[in-house]
Image: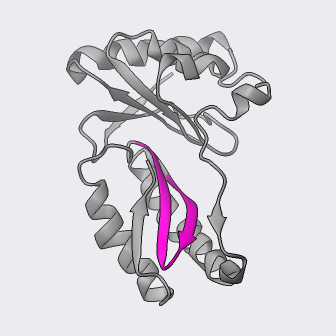
Amino acid sequence: MFIQTEATPNPATLKFLPGRPVLPEGTAEFRDPADAGRSPLAERLFSVNGVSGVFLGHDFISVTKANGEWQHLKPALLGAIMEHFMAGVPVMVQAGPAQAAAGEAGAEFFEEADGEIVETIKELIETRVRPAVAQDGGDITFQGFRDGVVYLNMRGSCSGCPSSTATLKNGIQNLLRHFVPEVREVQSVN
């Protein structure tokens, strides 16, 4: 098994590409070992000293470090990922209702009258923003819209990234304002 690694714009996060699907659909984020109970892979990665976050995408794994140098952490993480996939253990296990909500974003919020605007915003995020953000080992989802402000949930390598503010303001905000004149501003809800 060959696992590729890629740097992300967040120097504290590294993206691992195992060459096979990680999650068949959706994403999962684990911000601490206590959250990782529903993912044997995330649990294994948190067992590496210095790991502070794990984000699972369709075909990638993003790992965020709290401390240590990548040159020391990377071999242990590659080993953990390889051991996991070679053992044939599932990436996620069935979650009960309490576990299913762990690490997931809260309910969306917007006025019913803004439904059409929100659908346009969601479509733009889904088709133009999320694919680009996934390339950097993260994800971004719609959280809400109120008084011209779009609230987005940034996850994975995007969460805590030094360039995330520039991405929000110069990239996503400009894109949404161009196509949806009702949008004044974009903010992160992390």
- The prevailing secondary structure element of the residues shown in magenta is strand
Is residue 85 in view from this perspective? no
Is residue 25 in view from this perspective? yes
Q: In which quarter of the image is residue 114?
A: bottom right
Relative height, residue 176 to residue 85 (above, below): below
Residue 66 in percent (x, y) is at 29, 23
Q: Residue at x 59, y 34 (%)?
A: 20
Relative height, residue 123 to residue 98 (above, below): below
Residue 101 in percent (x, y) is at 68, 35
Frontmost residue, 70 versus 78:
70
Q: Which residue lies furthest to the bottom in this view?
A: 181
Relative height, residue 36 to residue 138 (above, below): above
Relative height, residue 181 to residue 154 (above, below): below
Segment tinted magenta in the rendering = 140-156
Q: Which residue is drawn at 63% across and 21% down?
A: 39
Q: Residue at x 38, y 44 (%)?
A: 159
Q: In which quarter of the image is residue 123?
A: bottom right
Residue 170 in percent (x, y) is at 29, 72
Residue 146 within the magenta-colored segment of the rendering = yes
Q: Quadrant of residue 38?
A: top right
Residue 129 in percent (x, y) is at 47, 65
